[in-house]
Structure formats: structure tokens, C-alpha cells
Amino acid sequence: MKRALVVLAVLPALLVATPGGALAADASYRTLSAASHPDWMRDLPDTTPLAALSIPGTHETMSIHGGALTQTQENFGDSGATLARQLTAGIRMIDIRARVNGGNTFTIHHGAAYQNANFGDVVAVLRTFLADHPGETVVMRLKQECTGQLGSCTDVSGQKSFADIFDSYVTPLFWQPSVTRATAAGLPTLGAVRGKVVLAVLHGAFGSPIEHYGLAHFDQWRDGSSTYVQDNYSVPNVGAIATKRDQVRRHLDTTGAGDPARWYVNFASGSSIFAQPQQVAGGALGVQGVNPFLLVYLNEGHGLRRTGTIMLDFPGAGLIDKIISYN
């Protein structure tokens, strides 16, 4: 997303020229409100490795403001209301991007665009949801959003480090081994983390993991792809959506054939100035989007035993339902 945001700052006039317009909602795209899975983990055995689950997630979970190049999710309201609706729908991995603000606090951004929410809102929504649904867990990827570069945001100066500020938000809501700075955690079973937030990774502004927060399994997860993560986020034009679809498919096949003790994360998202997030997700100019492709592929089966965690832009109810059904 960073490349797209730089161009957004330099060439705002191109927004008018970029093919846009609302794309038709369907079972794979922009119908999250039709999904309702608030307790889908509840009846799974406690001994189930979290890595073995098929988990629907959202990329740039809170990004609902800033225009076509910035918005990645349906807007269900500010101050965490959008997150709350996603959790009710069945989303169980979230991607949170924070700016260091005055008073040693975090605000939620996508690049330069403030998302009318703060990290305190995120924590409050998670606390309420998990109190009401104690059989569930939520996995979080937290990233320092501001690079100070053109098109990005700039952290407020004179504040504590990103890690120190994060520590001030940590409460018993978080699964403690994942938020211990000195020692990365092993991969847990579902029973160990019910009612808790699991920090998968804490990323710095340029994508490097901060100290040893999160899960040791993801210690090589940086900006973009790594052994267990597919995140080829640059889709230079609408025609290149086909390449992104193939990257998602290949990682999905790797996940299905892989060791269930290994956790695979597959980002279905991507963008550029000439391929907005909504177009990559839903399709444009006769090119099939990643979301409808995924739903068709999963419905066809292809011998898949699990999907791993799939991070989505503008997910539809049918796609969420299908991912959860693999459990």
C-alpha cells in the first residue's frame, strides 16, 4: 500500500482518471453484514492448534476513510464500530496500523489518512467482544504506520518508542506470551487463547519486527512476503489482478498441502494508483477480482484441507462463510 499512497500525495488528479465507480456486491465482495459467526470457534476442540485453523481476516482492518486508494473495508462506523461488525461476521485476524500521537497514544491511520479511531477504541471493542464470546480468540498484526515519507504520516515527536507505548495498552486481555518483549511465543492451541487477543507480530514503520513481540513462527515476516506469508501488495494495473490471483492461489495450494503445525497467512489484497483496492478485490474492466476468484476456487475444492488465514479487502458473506466451513 505504501507505493500507492506516495502517488496519491503527488498525483491527486489521477484519482479522477483512474477507472472507478461502485462495483456490484456479491457473495464474495462487500456483503460482510450478511455474515454472522460470532461464536464459530466455540465448539472446536481446545487441543486444536491455532495454526491449523482456516481463519478469515481483514487487511487494513480499520481503513474506511481517505478515498478510493485508501479505503479497504466497508464502513460500519467510526471509533471501532467497523471492527465490531467484522468480529460478529466471523473475522478473527485483524491488521491494525497505528500512528504515534501526543500523550504517548496510538491513533489509527492508513498512510496520511486518519481513520476516525484510536487504538483505545480497538482494545475496547476487542474486550467487549471477547467478554461476550469467551470461546473465541482474535489474532492481531500491529504495525507502526508512519514512515515520515511523502504520502505517509509522521509520528508526533517527543513521545516514547512505539514498543513502550504499546506496552502501556497491554492488559490481561492479551495472551501474555505474545506480548512479552524479550521472548517470542510458540504457536498456541485454541484452548490456551480463548477469550484473549494473540499478537502475531509487531512491525516497525518499514516492516521489520520490533524486538521479540508476537509469535516466533513469524520472526521472518517483514514488509511483503516471507516463508509463511504471501503479501505481494503491488498490483500495478487492473490487468495485473490476474497475477495477484495466481499468487493467492499458489499460496493457498501450499497451505493446503503444508504441515498443519505451520501457520500460513495469505493476503488477497493489493493496490496501486491504477488498481484501487476495491478493483483488486471485486474486479474491474472485465477482469475477475481476487475475492470472486477465491470463492469459486474454494467451492471447487481442489483437495484443500484448510485455507490458513486469508486477509481480505471488502469481504463478502459467502467468502467468510466458506473459509470458516473448512474448520
Image (spheres, rainbow, N blue to C red):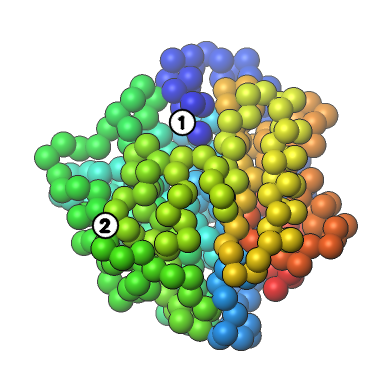
Question: Eyeballing the image, is 108 above or below 168?
Answer: above
* 17 vs 236, nearest the viewer: 236
The residue wearing badge 1 is 2
Residue pushed farthest left? 158
* 56 vs 228, nearest the viewer: 228
Question: What residue do we see at 79% from left, 37% from top?
Answer: 288
Secondary structure state at the residue bearing disc 2: helix
Question: Eyeballing the image, is 125 above or below 135?
Answer: above
Residue 184 position, x and y percent, is 36, 64
Secondary structure state at the residue bearing disc 1: helix
Residue 47: give its label.
none
* 267 vs 42, nearest the viewer: 267
Residue 169 position, x and y percent, is 26, 62
Question: Eyeballing the image, is 110 above or below 95?
Answer: above
User: CA gap, disc 1 to disc 2?
Assistant: 23 Å
Residue 166: give its label.
2
| Cβ atoms at labels 1 and 2 below 8 Å apart | no
Residue 96 as seen in the image, left or right of residue 275: left
Residue pushed farthest right? 300
Question: What residue do we see at 64% from left, 61% from top?
Answer: 308
Examine the image and state in which quarter residue 16 appears: top right
Figure quadrant of the C terminus: bottom right
Question: Eyeballing the image, is 181 above or below 250?
Answer: below
- On the question of residue 283 being in view, the answer is no
Residue 65 as seen in the image, left or right of residue 68: left
Residue 158 position, x and y percent, is 12, 40
Crowdedness of circle 1 by 10 Å Cα count: few (<14), some, many (20+)?
A: many
Residue 205 as seen in the image, left or right of residue 6: left
Amino acid type for the residue under numbered disc 2: Phe
Crowdedness of circle 2 by 10 Å Cα count: few (<14), some, many (20+)?
A: some
Amino acid type for the residue under numbered disc 1: Lys
